[in-house]
Image: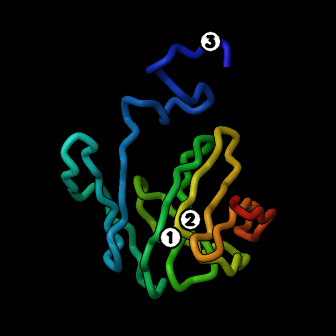
Amino acid sequence: DPGVTPGSDCFDNNPDLNPANSVLVTAPLTSGEVSKVDPATGAVDPYAMVDVVGINPWIPTSLAVNPVDGSVTVALAFNDRLATMNYCGGGKPTLMAMPHKKNICGLGYDRTGQLYGIDGQVDQLLTFNPDGSLAGVKPLT
């Protein structure tokens, strides 16, 4: 939008999301650990911890940060629902209310906060509603 300086704050409505404090993260299997990845070296270091007791299995396949409110959405293998979590503020991940019944290999938000996913099993672009249910499915061509 007008007024944005390239390389500076990317999200004018949320001062917590900008290149100075954004990190690349991964979520190793089963532990609840969130790890920071150094893009220059590939080194992985512990960054945060979430309590995953009660979510079995905890096998994250993808996670994405919502640019509007900073919330984190996680896709889990062998689970037909998404989960939300706050990896900076502690607390437990919460399974979203509605099932999606897809094999999600990637999640991402657009700048308005719309969540998208990729079903890697049948090559589909997925659009999600706020409750975790599917809003749309398009084949990838």
In the picture of the structure, the residue carrying the numbered disc 3 is 3
Quadrant where the N terminus is found in the figure: top right
In the picture of the structure, the residue carrying the numbered disc 2 is 84
Quadrant where the C terminus is found in the figure: bottom right
Question: Residue 12 vs residue 127: left or right?
Answer: left
In the picture of the structure, the residue carrying the numbered disc 1 is 93
User: Which element type, helix, strand or loop, lies under badge 1?
Assistant: loop
Q: Residue at x 48, y 64 (%)?
A: 62
Query: Which circle's residue, 2 or 1, is located before the other in the chain?
Result: 2
Q: Residue at x 70, y 68 (%)?
A: 132
Q: Which scheme is used to colour this image of the protein?
A: rainbow
Q: Amino acid at mark 2?
A: Thr
Query: Which circle's residue, 2 or 3, is located before the other in the chain?
Result: 3
Give the camera-side residue of 104 and 70. 104
Give how far apart the Cα atoms at labels 3 and 1 are: 36 Å
Query: Which circle's residue, 3 or 1, is located before the other in the chain?
Result: 3
